[in-house]
Image: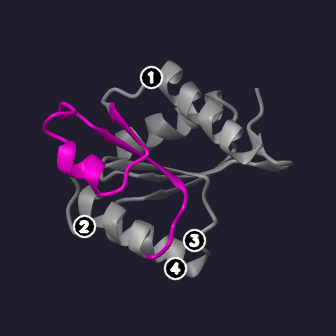
């Protein structure tokens, strides 16, 4: 399955302070057909990557909640205030009740860890529908 939006491949940014989680999410994205992936270790790095590119660079941002330097809530708010329209999927070990502030910051999706191929496939499907 190859993922593209209007003739171009979907691009994803993985934001997580855990190297293991970044690798797992990279592999999962590859499994659902996303070939263009970048990684950031915290929210500030994610913002810097987008500032050096464009707010439209990524179709999907997988955002961890608990990270040093800048957490997922702060980063999501900052990205939305910059006009970033990418789909942002919050990924955390917290329950959705505990993560309400994260969702209110501007998430399009919230998934409890572990993220699964089925959950990720649904998000990718939604991105395809959004770009048609």
Alpha carbons under labels 2 and 4: distance apart: 16 Å
Determine which quarter of the picture holds residue 121: top right
Q: Which residue is mark 3?
A: 55
Alpha carbons under labels 2 and 1: distance apart: 25 Å
Alpha carbons under labels 4 and 3: distance apart: 7 Å
Task: Judge depth for marks 3 and 2 and give the one in front.
Answer: 3
Q: Which of the marked residues, 4 or 1, is nearer the chain's N terminus?
A: 4
Alpha carbons under labels 3 and 2: distance apart: 18 Å
Q: Which residue is mark 4?
A: 51
Residue 30 highlighted magenta (yes or no):
no
State the extent of the magenta-drawn residues as a range.
Answer: 82-111
Q: Residue furthest right?
A: 7
Q: Residue furthest bottom?
A: 52
Alpha carbons under labels 4 and 1: distance apart: 30 Å
Report the coloring of the rendering.
Answer: one colour
Classify residue 82 as left or right of residue 110. right
Helix, strand or loop under label 1: loop
At 54% from the left edge and 34% from the top edge, which residue is drawn?
123
Quadrant in the picture for the N terminus:
top right
Instruction: Give the percent coordinates (x, y) of residue 23.
Output: 46, 40
Helix, strand or loop under label 4: helix
Quadrant in the picture for the C terminus:
top right
Instruction: Give the percent coordinates (x, y) of residue 104.
Output: 27, 52
Viewer can see residue 78: yes
Judging depth in this view, the residue of 132 and 76 nearest the camera is 132
Q: Which of the marked residues, 3 or 1, is nearer the chain's N terminus?
A: 3
**Label 2: few (<14), some or many (≥20) within 10 Å?**
some
Q: Which residue is mark 2?
A: 70
Instruction: Give the percent coordinates (x, y) of residue 50.
Output: 52, 72
């Amino acid at each position: 399955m190859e993922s593209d939006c209007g003739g171009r491949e979907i691009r994803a940014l993985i934001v997580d302070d855990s190297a293991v989680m970044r690798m797992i999410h990279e592999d999962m994205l590859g499994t659902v057909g996303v070939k263009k992936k970048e990684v950031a270790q915290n929210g500030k790095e994610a913002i810097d990557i987008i500032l050096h590119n464009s707010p439209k660079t990524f179709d999907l941002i997988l955002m961890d909640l608990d990270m040093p330097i800048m957490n997922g809530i702060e980063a999501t708010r900052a990205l939305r205030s910059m006009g970033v329209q990418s789909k942002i999927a919050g990924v955390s070990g917290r329950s959705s009740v505990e993560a309400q502030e994260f969702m209110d910051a501007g998430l399009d999706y919230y998934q409890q860890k572990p993220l699964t191929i089925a959950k990720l496939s649904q998000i990718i499907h939604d991105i395809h529908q959004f770009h048609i």
